[in-house]
Image: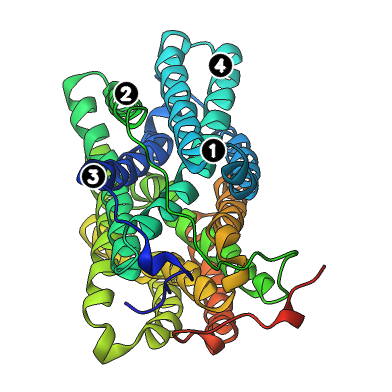
Amino acid sequence: MTAIAESPGLSDAAPATRAEGAVVYLAGAVQGIVLVTFPAASTIFTDPDQYGFTNTQYGLLFLPQVATAITASLLGAALGRRIGTKRVFLAGLACGLVAMLLLILSTSVESDTSIAFPVLLVATAFLGAGFGLAVPALNTLTAAFHPTRVSSSVLVLNALLGLGTALAPVFVAIFVGLGFWWGLPLLSALLLSALLAVSVRLSLRPPQPESARIATGIPHRFWMYATFAVLYGVCETVNGNWSQLDMTTRLGASTTQAAIALTVFWAMVTVGRVVFAAIDRWLGVRTTYHLLPFLLAATFVLIALLPDGSTTAGVLAFGLAGLACSALLPLTIGFGEDELTAFAAAMAGGVIACYQLGYGIAAFGVGPLLDRGVELSTVYASSALIAVAMGLVSFRVARRARAGAETRSDEVTA
């Protein structure tokens, strides 16, 4: 994978200790589990015998998450310069822990929507803040701790984050079978607590670049990356947040089959990142970047056309959607760091913030549509148009995606 360039001055930096490297990678997997905890429990939240939320209420749960994730992502780089990347990372873990504890607490009042719903809104707000602080910090630490293997190390981090997202619905299915679905947030809380206890004892201090240039404003080209990230966030979330409901309400799948579909989606996101990195020399990252959105568009059409009862085909289709999504977000960050070197420190946070905006549009926007009688098949068919638009934008994003690309001074606005 050649999409993520080394930052100036990091080539002489000392590598991290084994403990620091292991904690950063493990934190990526845990963040994946935590992030998908709420979507993985979608059938629990909308079950009339449990929380009994409407589709609109379920979608509304993600608005605080999106708002705080965007804010935290945008502020993360500045906070890192003031208080250090380690403290930003620890704050992200702490916010995630609060979110999981509130989710567990909500189970005691799940039958009372007037209490449970506000508690969960606060929980998703903390979840978003934790994601927005921790994930950009993890990208920064990973690149800094592996200066001679920046591309591969960031790919591994994203693959592990994808692995965590794939495991979350599996854990939900297991815990539902055992009679306590809240075992997932409990497990997440224990993992976050362990990470906090270990991380606070480590240095986790990335080496400072010797000759890094700092942008004094936002480059004009960044907005093309931002547009792509928003479109991608919509497409990924239509699969990640609504696939289980599509499986159960339209295709007639059981809760377990729906959980398998979500697991397969996130598993293929992870597998795809590894596969496309492995075939980079034959296919090329820019070719991959251009092809995947159109593959995703075709998959959306396939999902929309699936008839009632085609549960196996549904699982396979969502797996194909995961493959089509897999490399797009890491490549977007990588291309941006290659091209906008003066803005590289804030690039990951900026792209993730825009991705979260797209996440919010799909996470909340689909609910009211369903409550107004719009079919999920229509939602997926319409999403194909968004994927096509993303494919067209990819040609603008990747036109300068080559090793060593640098930002011209006149591309940065004061």
User: Where's residue 330, x and y in %?
Assistant: 42, 66
Per the image, the residue denoted by label 4 is: 113
Q: Amino acid at mark 4?
A: Thr
- In the image shown, does 111 or 284 lie closer to the viewer? 284
Residue type, label 1: Gly
Residue wearing tag 2: 197
The relative height of residue 134 versus residue 315 in the rendered view (above or below) is above
Query: Can the viewer see residue 79 in this picture?
Result: yes
Which of pointers 3 and 4 lies earlier in the amino acid sequence? 3
Return the x and y of residue 40 as percentages of the image width and height.
Answer: 36, 39
Q: Which residue is mark 1?
A: 128
Question: CA–CA distance between discs 1 and 2?
Answer: 21 Å
Q: Earlier in the sequence, mark 2 or mark 4?
A: 4
The C terminus, quarter of image: bottom right
Q: Nearer the viewer, residue 304 or 62?
A: 62
178 relative to 115 in the view: left or right: left
Q: CA distance from mark 2 to mark 4?
A: 35 Å
| Label 3 element class | helix
Q: Closer to us: mark 3 or mark 1?
A: 3
